[in-house]
């Protein structure tokens, strides 16, 4: 096995496209289909990854909305907030702080103005996450369009090749 031909060495490659095209084992149609399949598969993987990222951000947004509901539920009639005796809310706020939301550390009592600032900080965090999701959705849209264009490109190559073969067969039969 010390002396391998180039074609044999190429057949050892892991990438089936490189292996088959370089080894000249495929027809033009087969090569187009293989390349299109690989391209579409790569785009699908990118789209799925982007969707996972969007979903993770949406879960953070839902969590922050839950904090806003909890803050509203524990706000007194004087519009003050005291979560000193609410370990569940304290835990939620600590998690929000870890997510990057600016929440005063160690402070458990808020008057009307500081409560409104806290709510505004959380809302700004939600807005930031929503903006990231919108930008990611633009990427998903672009990838989806690329996937469609890949199908269309393959179709635009395959259709004339098929028509050419059919014309050759008709001429061969003498029609």
Image (spheres, helix red, strand yellow):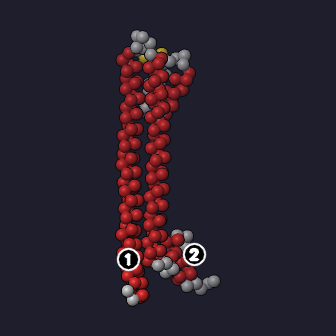
Would you place residue 111 above or below residue 66 in this image? above
* Left or right relative to 7: residue 137: left
Relative to 21, residue 60 above or below: above
Residue nearest the observer in this picture, 151 or 124:
151
The image quadrant that residue 159 belongs to is bottom left
Location of mark 1 (residue): 163
Distance from label 2 to label 1 (Cα)? 35 Å
The tag on residue 86 is none
The number of callouts visible is 2
In screen coordinates, is 117 left or right of 11? left
- The residue under the point 48% across, 51% down is 48
Q: Residue furthest right?
A: 1
Quick one: SS at disc 2? loop
Residue 155 on image: x %, y %: 39, 68
Q: Secondary structure at mark 1?
A: helix
Q: Is residue 107 visible?
A: no
**Horizontal and vertical percent for residue 55?**
47, 42
How far across and how far down the image is residue 46, in percent? 45, 55
Name the residue at 56% across, 21% down.
87
Where residue 23 appears, x then y in whole percent? Answer: 51, 80
Estimate how packed mark 1 is, as few (under 14), some (14 to 19) or many (20 or more) residues with alpha carbons within 10 Å: few
**Labels 2 and 1: the sequence-earlier one:** 2
Marks 2, 1: nearer the viewer: 1
| Horizontal side, residue 29 vs residue 86: left or right | left
Residue 36 or 158: which is nearer the viewer?
158
Q: Is residue 155 visible?
A: yes
The disc at residue 12 is 2
Q: Quadrant of the N terminus?
A: bottom right
**What residue is at 45 percent from the left and 40 percent from the top?**
57
Residue positioned 36% across, 49% down in the render? 138
Task: Estimate how packed mark 2 is, as few (under 14), some (14 to 19) or many (20 or more) residues with alpha carbons within 10 Å.
Answer: few
- The quarter in which the C terminus is drawn is bottom left
């Amino acid at each position: 096995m010390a002396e391998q031909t180039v074609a044999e060495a190429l057949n050892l490659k892991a990438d089936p496209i490189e292996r088959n095209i370089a080894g000249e084992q495929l027809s033009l149609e087969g090569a187009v289909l293989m390349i299109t399949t690989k391209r579409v598969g790569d785009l699908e993987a990118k789209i799925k990854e982007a969707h996972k990222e969007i979903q993770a951000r949406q879960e953070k947004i839902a969590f922050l909305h839950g904090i806003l509901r909890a803050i509203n539920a524990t706000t007194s009639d004087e519009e003050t907030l005291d979560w000193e005796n609410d370990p569940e809310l304290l835990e939620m706020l600590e998690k929000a702080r870890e997510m990057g939301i600016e929440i005063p550390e160690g402070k458990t009592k808020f008057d009307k103005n500081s409560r409104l600032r806290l709510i505004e900080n959380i809302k700004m965090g939600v807005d930031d996450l929503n903006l990231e999701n919108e930008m990611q959705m633009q990427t998903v849209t672009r990838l989806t369009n690329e996937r469609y264009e890949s199908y269309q490109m393959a179709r635009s190559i395959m259709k004339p090749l098929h028509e050419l073969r059919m014309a050759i067969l008709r001429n061969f039969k003498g029609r």
